[in-house]
Amino acid sequence: MIYIYNFLLLIGLAAALPYAFYRLITKKDTLAVNIEKFGNYRFQRPHEGGIWFHAVSVGEVNTIMPLVQEMIKRHPKTSIILSVGTSTGMEVARSKIEGKATLIYFPYDFSFSVKKALSYIRPSLVVLTETEIWPNFISRAKKSNVRIVLVNGRISDTSYGRYKTVKFLFAPFIRMIDRFLMQSDIDMERILSLGAPRESVAITGNLKFDRPVPTAMSKEDIRAEFNIPADRLVLIFASTHRGEEEIFIDLSKKLFSRYERIMIIIAPRHTSRADEVKKICMENGFEFTLRSKREEQHGNLMILDTLGELSTLYGAAEVAVIGGSFIPHGGQNPLEALSWKVPVVFGPHMENFKEISNKLIEAGGARRSVNADELFESVTHWLDDPNERKNAGLAGHDVIVKNRGAMQKTIEEVESLING
């Protein structure tokens, strides 16, 4: 099967070369990063027998970070490696554990790339996050007697459909993974149907419920930090994607007419899109300030064009609208806002957070809006009624509290593989 996979991989490489070249000339990627992704690492070689964690981008890095930090504390003499797939993921990783772990880019899944990477790093355990099935990497790791565990395992509806189509290709590599720690019953059933041995699968819950609030700052202190006047109603459009800002700008026009003292913050999921968001705002006649300029917020609109501050900024808000859910993207994590007891509104596309979003709606901590009219009604419902808003935030936060515990279970499972 590995030969079929590698043949398809080469075809995919040929098709992707023009796009890769485009990213290089537009400076969205660098030559140094691509060299590293081919397994050519130039950092000081870690000690043999380390623990290699992998998280693709910002969301996965934030989710797995408490686990990585706990392993750093528990195993101070063991090399800890964290690999990422994106530059933004690397920025977040560096901001949290630079100097405490070896931070690298994950190798492209070519046989020669992963062979070089694994030979250089020489881990004893690899910890993959959520849905990471890389056949060449997994195959080479097993040939090197490296144990592999998938933590916070999740298989979305879309991914499940794709994996089922090529089950004959992926099943042999899925069986090479030593342990699957899945988020839910449905995730467990899906990984079993794709070939995982039943004795290797456990349900440990969702690590996102265990993420701590990023700061002990009060709402007043956070507003002061972001130069937001204390008397404003604050609404955040969080982790927005292309195609959503236009929806949110149209809504903002109505909200500015309805509320004299409202403050609206647009936080694009990728800060590299800040100029694009600025252009949309200007085309609609909106004045705005940029967080990166650290200006006092005299206007009613701010663009959050900095990385790593959204999780804190939620603490200044009355309501948060979750991006990635009003286009077919699959949504973004709504729990960060609710960790501050801030109720959330999201659109119809929360496929990547299906179980979480359903629990929040059932508890009353979130609302789903399928169109612009429903979004307006949901947002104004909570902005108009402080008591309803407070109760919704408490209900959503209670869902987080009741579903904690995945971290401890995951730590115990990982430790058993380290010591086994």
Image: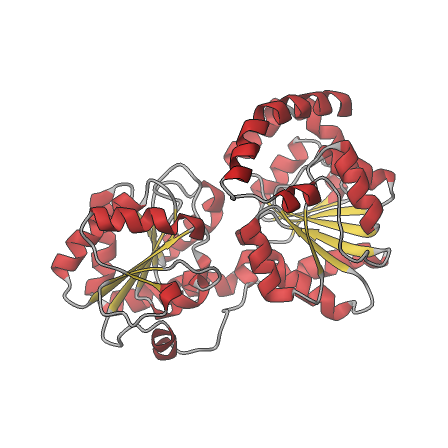
Q: Residue at x 15, y 63 (%)?
A: 259
Residue 377 drawn at (x, y percent)? 20, 51
Q: Residue at x 65, y 37 (%)?
A: 191
- Using the rendered image of the protein, determine whether residue 270 is visible from the camera's viewpoint: no
Residue 98 drawn at (x, y percent)? 65, 65
- Quadrant where the N terminus sits is top right
Q: Is residue 145 left or right of residue 33?
A: right
- Quadrant where the C terminus sits is bottom right
Q: How many marks?
A: 0
Q: Is residue 146 left or right of residue 404?
A: right
Q: Residue at x 81, y 51 (%)?
A: 121
Check the image and name the residue furthest to the front.
25
Front in this rendered view, residue 166 or 264: 264
- Using the rendered image of the protein, determine whether residue 281 is visible from the camera's viewpoint: yes
The image quadrant that residue 396 belongs to is bottom left
Residue 296 drawn at (x, y percent)? 29, 72
Residue 49 drawn at (x, y percent)? 85, 55
Q: Residue at x 39, y 64 (%)?
A: 292
Q: Is residue 86 left or right of residue 48?
A: left
Classify 148 as above or below 411: above
Check the image and name the residue furthest to the left.
257
Classify 186 as above or below 311: above
Front in this rendered view, residue 190 or 279: 279
Front in this rendered view, residue 65 or 281: 281
Front in this rendered view, residue 6 or 306: 306
